[in-house]
Image (cartoon, helix red, strand yellow):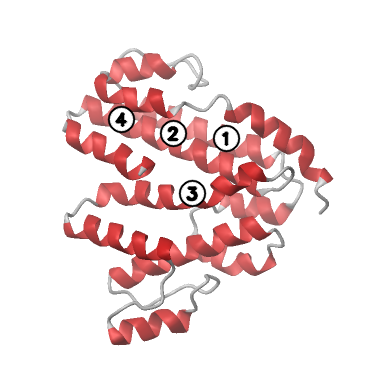
Amino acid sequence: MSEKSYIYAIGRISVLETKLLPSSVIWGFLEQSWEGIVNQVRNNWFNQEVSDSFDFDKFEQYFDVERKLTFNTVAELIPEKRLIEILKHFNDFRFISSAVASIPYPLLLKYLRKKIDYKNLEIFLRGGEEFLEGGFYSVEFWKKSCQSKELRDLSDDMKMLKEELETLYKEEENYLLFFCRANFERKILDESKKLFADPSRLFYYFLLKDLEISIVRFFIYGKFYGVRQDKLKRVLEVYYG
């Protein structure tokens, strides 16, 4: 697929990126009530009429619709069926493992392989043995590491990730694991902003929008159910760390 196929798509995505909530707004959620957060995002985020009263099922419907709209918007801009399938299975690591070898775009390939490395590191730290093919580190590497019970020759970013995951496991802060992985993935796809016409930029927007939905959801529910302020703040520290 030629780069020209993605020029229009990147133009559309560039416009959509300007509508993402800036970090200053998201950090501001810490000082707001759940009603305040809903009002903050009502006009430029929710694409449906939002109730002023809290209804868990309705909010779940709102978030589900928002995710489907995001997927449809990005999928319509992708001219390659195989990439649409990867987008559809964005968090299905086994599917990604089976599809990664067919990706010809360097940054997108790097991102997907790093994604598999993350999952394998998680499996290792949890004491599992069913590792996935397709990452930068082979299945044999992970199995040998299991036998020796130590990890050697990790890249700097993987060393940092290992330390962070170990801390989260030790402190039993499992609710932060999603945001830890999100931060790891976001940093990889940050490079896509330098590319003029590359599908990785579409995946980058999809990732950012999915994370935005997750953060808004976490804060609305967290505020309503009285989650401690330090736990809410920790989410942002992990994600923006």
Q: Tell me whether the residue at label 4 lies in contact with that at label 1, contact meaning CB atoms closer than 8 angstroms.
A: no
Secondary structure, mark 2, is helix
Q: Which of marks 2 and 3 precedes in the sequence?
A: 3
CA distance for labels 3 and 4:
23 Å
- Looking at the image, is mark 1 or mark 3 nearer the viewer? 3
Mark 4–mark 1 Cα distance, whole angstroms, equals: 20 Å
Marks 3/2: CA–CA distance = 18 Å
Q: Name the residue under label 2.
A: 213
At horizontal 57% and vertical 39% (from top left) the residue drawn is 205
Image point 18% across, 31% down: which residue? Answer: 229
Q: In which quarter of the image is the N terminus?
A: bottom right
- Disc 4 target residue: 219
Q: What residue sits right under mark 3 in the picture? A: 187
Q: Give the percent coordinates (x, y) of residue 21.
A: 47, 26
Q: Label 4: how many residues lie within 10 Å, few (<14), some (14-19) or many (20+)?
A: many
From the viewer's perspective, is residue 31 above or below residue 107? above
Q: Is residue 130 above or below residue 112?
A: below
Amino acid found under the numbered disc labelled 1: Thr
Q: In which quarter of the image is residue 195?
A: top right
Q: Are marks 2 and 1 in contact (CB under 8 Å)?
A: yes
User: In the drawing, what numbered circle is on residue 163?
Assistant: none
Query: In the image, which disc is placed on residue 70?
Result: 1
Q: What residue type is labelled 3?
A: Lys
